Amino acid sequence: LNVEKWKYCSGASSSASQNRFVTLTVTPYSFKCNKLRIPLRFTRVNGINKAGKITLLGQDGVNWSVHLVKDSRWGRMRLGRDWRGFCEVHGVKIGESFVLELVWEEDASPVLKFCNKLK
């Protein structure tokens, strides 16, 4: 069962262009605890597996440096401090979702570019 789950999460059947985008939802829990989880499938497919700094690129071209934190022993990653300010500037409120696009080079730290807010 675990092997099958890993194969599904590996994204082998998905195209590379689809794997660049991730939709995140600001929940009351994520806002209160200041923890915005990134889907495990997205991080695994794109090789995002180390805690550290990550850059959020706003629509206005401003870079926001945010902590990327490993949230569990299973490898789930989340955005740490400062993501709430990024959401506030882009008008994303509790209960709303937004789309980020991964734009990075293999040697650099990840950059997630704000694409749009969903209602």
Image: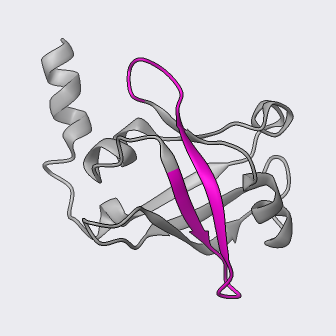
Question: In the figure, is residue 79 to the left or right of 119?
Answer: left
User: Within the image, what quadrant is residue 41 found in?
Assistant: top left
Work out which residue is located at the far bottom of the displayed protein and give it.
Answer: 60
Above/below status of 2 relative to 109: above
Q: Where is residue 81 in the image (x, y as percent from the top left)?
A: 73, 46
Q: Using the image as rendered, state which of residue 78 and residue 22 is in the foreground.
A: 78
Residue 22, given in percent of the width and then of the height, sits at 48, 57
Which residue lies at the image location 15% right of the left edge and 32% below the top edge? Answer: 7
- Quadrant of res 37: top right
Q: In this view, does 111 lie to the left or right of 16?
A: right
Does the stretch in magenta take in 87?
no
Q: Position of residue 107 (x, y in %)?
A: 26, 66
The quadrant the C terminus occupies is bottom right
Total labels: the figure holds 0
Q: What stretch is highlighted in magenta?
A: 53-75
- Residue at the image position 53 percent from the left and 27 percent from the top: 71
Q: Please tell me which residue is depicted at 18% across the width and 11% down the height of the picture.
A: 1
Q: In this view, does 70 lie to the left or right of 92?
A: left
* Membership of 60 in magenta stretch: yes
- The percent coordinates of residue 114 (x first, y second) are 60, 72
Q: In the picture shown, does residue 110 fall above or below 33?
A: below
